[in-house]
Image (cartoon, rainbow, N blue to C red):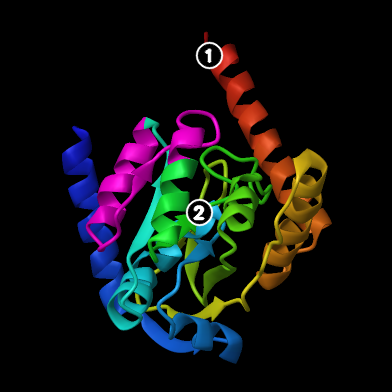
Amino acid sequence: MNIRFRAWIATQFLRLIYLTIRWEKIDLPESSKQYLDQEKGMLLALWHNQIPNIIDFTYKFFILKCKKTVIPMASQSKDGELVTRVIANFGMIPKRGSSRKGGATALKALIQDARNGNVSLITPDGPTGPVYQLKPGIIQLASMTGYPILSYYGKYDRYWIIPSWDHTFLPKPFSKVTFFISEPFYVPKLKGEEEIEIWRKKFEAFMLAQIGLTEQEAENVRKEVREATEAKRKDREDRK
C-alpha cells in the first residue's frame, strides 16, 4: 500500500472519529488568550503521543478561530512522511526535519517562520523518543526567537493506546474531550549547553506537570516501552 493511499485512509478514519467527538471545554488561561489575540509569533508544543488527539483541535482552534499559520516539524522518516501528509490535510504546513536528520536546517526554517509571525509546532520527544523526554531543539528555538511556548493536549474520557514507542493515544468514537492550553512559557537568551540543559529540564517538568505526570511516572512509561521492545526483539530471535 503506497504512502499516499495510507495517508488518505488515515485522514478519513480520523475525520470520521472527530465528527463524533464532543468538545466539553477549552481550558485557556487569560494570559494565553491575550497573547493569541495579538499578531505575534509563538511556539506550540505537545508530546508526540498526543498527535491524534489534537489534529482536529489545532485546525479548528488555532488555524480557523485564531487565524494562525501552523507549521509543524515532521520527521524525514517514512512514518514522518505519513504524518506529514495527514496533518497537511488539516490545514497545517509541515517542515521536514528532526533531531537526527535535517534538524539544523529545519530549526533555521522554523526560526524564520516564527519571526514572520507564524506558529511553529514541535513534538519535543519526537520523532523516536524516548517518550516524555524533551529534546533541546524547542528550547533553542524559544531562546533565539524570544517567543513564548504554549503546550497543549486533549484529555479524552475514552481512548485506545497504540502499542508504539510513545504509547500513542487515539480517541474512541463518541468520546468527550477537554483541551488544555498552558500559560506562555518564556525562555531567556541562553548561552552554552549548560544553560540550555537547565531550561530543557524546566520545560520538560512543565509539560509533564500539565498532563499530570511526575518524572518517576514518565520514567515508568519509558521502562515499560523498553521492556516491550526487548520482548519483541527476543521473540523475533526465537522464531529464527
Query: Mark 1 near mark 2, Cβ–Cβ under 8 Å?
Result: no
Disc 1 target residue: 239
Check if residue 100 falls in the magenta segment.
Answer: yes
Q: Tag on residue 122? A: 2
Q: Residue at x 43, y 37 (%)?
A: 97
Q: Residue at x 26, y 54 (%)?
A: 88
Q: Residue at x 69, y 35 (%)?
A: 226
Question: Is residue 67 among what the camera can see?
Answer: yes
* Position in image of residue 4 (x %, y %): 18, 40
Identify which residue, 166 or 133, lies in the foreground: 133
Image quarter for residue 126?
A: top right
Kindly report the distance in space between the C-alpha atoms of the residues bearing marks 1 and 2. 39 Å
Check if residue 183 falls in the magenta segment.
Answer: no
Q: Is residue 9 above or below residue 29?
A: above
* Position in image of residue 215 (x %, y %): 80, 56
Q: Is residue 194 above or below residue 23?
A: above
In the image, which residues are magenta? 78-106
Q: Nearer the viewer, mark 1 or mark 2?
A: 2
Q: Tag on residue 168? A: none
Q: Residues within 10 Å of mark 2 (few under 14, many from 20)?
A: many
Q: Residues within 10 Å of mark 1 (few under 14, many from 20)?
A: few
Going from the N terminus, do you reach mark 1 or mark 2 first?
2
Identify which residue, 11 or 142, lies in the foreground: 142
Q: What amino acid is at disc 1? A: Arg
Could you tell me which secondary element the residue under label 1 belongs to?
helix
Q: What amino acid is at disc 2? A: Ile
Q: Residue furthest top?
A: 240
- Looking at the rendered image, the quarter that the N terminus falls into is top left
Question: 83 left or right of 170?
Answer: left
Question: 124 left or right of 53?
Answer: right
Q: Residue at x 70, y 50 (%)?
A: 221
* Position in image of residue 151 (x %, y %): 57, 68
